[in-house]
Amino acid sequence: MAGLESGTLWSIILAGGEGMRLRPLVERIHADGRPKQFAVLVGSKSLLRHTLDRSARLVPPERTVVVTTRSHESFFAGELWGEVPPRVLVQPSDRGTAAGVLLPAHRIARIDPDAYAIVLPSDHYVGDDAVFMTHVERLAAAAYRHPMRILLAGARPDGPDTGYGWIQPGVPLEKAPAGGLNRIDRFLEKPTEEAARACMARGGLWNTFVMAARVRTLIEAGRRALPRLHERLARIGDRDGASEQLGIDNAYRLAPPENFSHSVLAALPGWLAVSPLPEMVWSDWGTPDRVLETLRREGLAPEWMRRLATTA
């Protein structure tokens, strides 16, 4: 990547959520109570394993940090195959996406103070991993050129879906990465249908929650927007092993749940920039409707889908 030494790029994979909206479908496929990131919804691998493999196209496992939750550990163990497993941060409980992003950011900064990171949720469907990760690589390179910004990958909407965060692009910052990089005039987290339609008419994009940024910029954004959470995570300090886990447990004990999009991104639009994904199929598999719609669009019929159709 031009201008970005590969040794300073890390990957943060978010795998700690409960996936409540998708749970009715997951429970019909898997009877063991697993959250959606551990469900096998397409192909032979879980959503998390697909994300790990996607990330490995750009970042090696030793610079990959997966954020999980203690109650998921029995499902997590089976995902860590490979000669070099990724680093794992275990949250004592789910405190929302703000802690999910900022906890690993603090951890990476202690190891590599000048690091940059990509952030990948583990519940997405990506139709073309190579095209997708090429765009993420370009986004990471752009983050090096704009170290005080958080760069977001936006998806072109096909309707006024109120379940997504919406981004209103502003003036261009540069022509790269492919599709361009723009300032963000406004960030709307799960708006009304009327607001979503208006944003869509003005060229608005869905927030994919795929990001690239200097790690210290993520931390500073957390300090500005969520000072109480920042203070708790900063107290973990330079610990290791069991001492680090004790520090995480203590930090989470009274930490309030916070949403990174609502509490950080929407609060700091001047810190943000967005680049639209190239033409490809992408979906946040947060609801059964999105899963089924994507599978139909892609012409895919997994075994579980055929099985459920025969028992309906």
Image (spheres, rainbow, N blue to C red):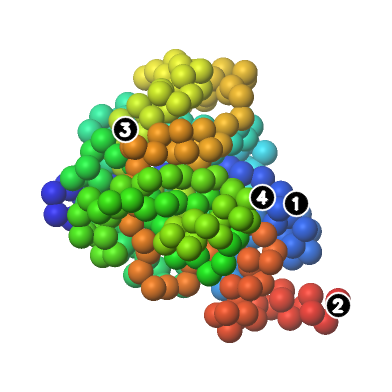
Q: Earlier in the sequence, mark 2 or mark 1?
A: 1
Q: Nearer the viewer, mark 1 or mark 3?
A: 3
- The first of marks 1 and 4 along the sequence is 4
User: What is the crowding at mark 4: few (fewer than 14 residues within 10 Å), some, or many (at least 20)?
Assistant: some
Q: Which mark is residue 283?
A: none
Circle nearer the viewer, 3 or 2: 3
Indicate the position of residue 38 as horizontal and vertical percent values.
Answer: 61, 55
**228 and 198: which one is in front?**
198
Which residue is disc 3 drawn over? 217
Name the quadrant containing residue 62: top left
Q: Which residue is mark 4?
A: 19
Residue 293 is left or right of residue 122, and the answer is: right
The single residue placed furthest to the right in the displayed view is 312
Name the residue: 71% across, 53% down: 21
Q: Vertically, is 152 above or below 46?
A: above
Could you say whether the residue bearing mark 4 is in a helix, strand or loop? loop
Res 87 quadrant in image: top left
Which quarter of the rendered picture does the C terminus lie within?
bottom right
**x, y (%) of residue 48?**
53, 56
To which residue does mark 1 refer?
33
Q: How many marks?
A: 4
Residue 108: where, in percent of width, then height?
35, 33
Residue located beneath label 2 in the image: 311
Q: CA distance from mark 3 to mark 2?
A: 51 Å
233 and 239: which one is in front?
Answer: 233
Between the C-alphas of marks 1 and 4, the distance is: 11 Å
- Estimate how packed mark 3 is, as few (under 14), some (14 to 19) or many (20 or more) residues with alpha carbons within 10 Å: some
Check disc 3 and give the amino acid type.
Thr
Q: Amino acid at mark 2?
A: Thr
Q: Give the percent coordinates (x, y) of residue 72.
A: 64, 43
